[in-house]
Every structure is written in C-alpha cells, then in structure tokens.
Image: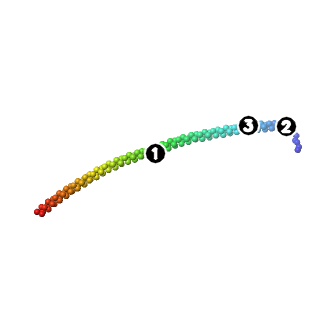
Amino acid sequence: MAETKMDPRSEPDALYLVQTENVHLKETISALRDGLEKLTLQNEENLQNAANARNEEIVQLKHAVGAMRDEIEKMEFEREKSIENALAGANEEINQLKGAITALREELERNQIKYEEAMREFKRETQSETAQLQQTIWVLRKKLEE
C-alpha cells in the first residue's frame, strides 16, 4: 500500500474542519436534545390535559348518573304514591259498595217481611170474605128452600 503523505500545511486545515464539524455536531445534538425536551414536555402537557379532560368528563358523568338516579327515585315514588292512591280509592269504593249492599239487603228483607205480612193479611181477608160469602150462600139457599 502506498502511503500518501499529507502536506503539513493541510493538517491544521483538516483539524480545523474536524473541529468545526464537531462543533456543528454538538450544536445539532444540543438542538435535538432541546427539541426532544420540548416534545417530552409537550407530550406530558398533552397527557395532563387529556387526564384532566377525562377526569372532568368522569365528574360530569357522575353528576348525570346521580341526576338520573334521583329522577328514577322520584318516578318510583310517584308511581308508588299513585298505586297507594288507587288502592285507597278502590278500598273506599269497596266499602261504599259494601254499605250499599248491606242497605239494599236490609231493605229487601224489610220488603220481604212487608210482602209476607201483606200476603197473610190478604189470605185472612180472603178467608174471611170467603167465609162471609159461604155464609151468605148458605143463608140464601135456606131462604130459597123455604
């Protein structure tokens, strides 16, 4: 292999170029580090914002669920109250109907008694009238036979 000799004057130029390149590489590394740090900070901020938004949404959902539970409980209470009122009304109507049945039964019994008394009276009157008519017939026959 053939060795190439460098010009002694070009050695400082090469060194300068290497040093300049090192400086540029260091500046690039520093810029990349700064960019990476900015991205890391931005990502952390974005994550924090997302977490805050999620937490806020959770709080809102909890409030919505609580409001819905309250509404369901209110509706359940109203339904139970409505059922109780309907039952109370039905019980009141049943009691009124029982009272009406009792009153009608008593009236029917009174009318039955009146009817039976009227029939007995009718039978007595009929028997009495029949007896009178038979007596009249007997008297008239006697008169005819004489």
Give left or right: position of 130 versus 111. left
Quadrant of image for the N terminus: top right
Instruction: Name the image quarter holding residue 139.
Output: bottom left
Name the residue tied to disc 2: 11
Q: Secondary structure at mark 3?
A: helix
- Which x, y percent locates residue 98? 35, 48
Please name the residue shown 37% across and 47% down the image.
95
- Is 8 in front, or is 90? 90
- Which x, y percent locates residue 53? 60, 40
Q: Secondary structure at mark 2?
A: helix
Give left or right: position of 51 versus 128. right
Give left or right: position of 143 versus 104. left
Please name the residue shown 56% across and 40% down the image.
59
Kind of residue sitting beneath label 2: Glu
- Which x, y percent locates residue 30? 73, 37
Name the residue tied to disc 3: 30
Instruction: Say if mark 3 contacts mark 1, CB within 8 Å.
Output: no
Select label 2 or label 1 by which is in front.
1
Kind of residue sitting beneath label 1: Arg
Q: Residues within 10 Å of mark 1 (few under 14, many from 20)?
A: few
Q: Residues within 10 Å of mark 3 (few under 14, many from 20)?
A: few
- Which x, y percent locates residue 4? 87, 41
- Is 23 in front, or is 134? 134
Please name the residue shown 15% across and 60% down the image.
138
Name the residue tied to disc 1: 79
Q: Earlier in the sequence, mark 3 or mark 1?
A: 3
Select label 3 or label 2 by which is in front.
3
Kind of residue sitting beneath label 3: Ser
Select label 3 or label 1 by which is in front.
1
Q: Earlier in the sequence, mark 3 or mark 2?
A: 2
Q: Secondary structure at mark 1?
A: helix
- Mark 2 → mark 1, Cα distance in angstroms: 99 Å
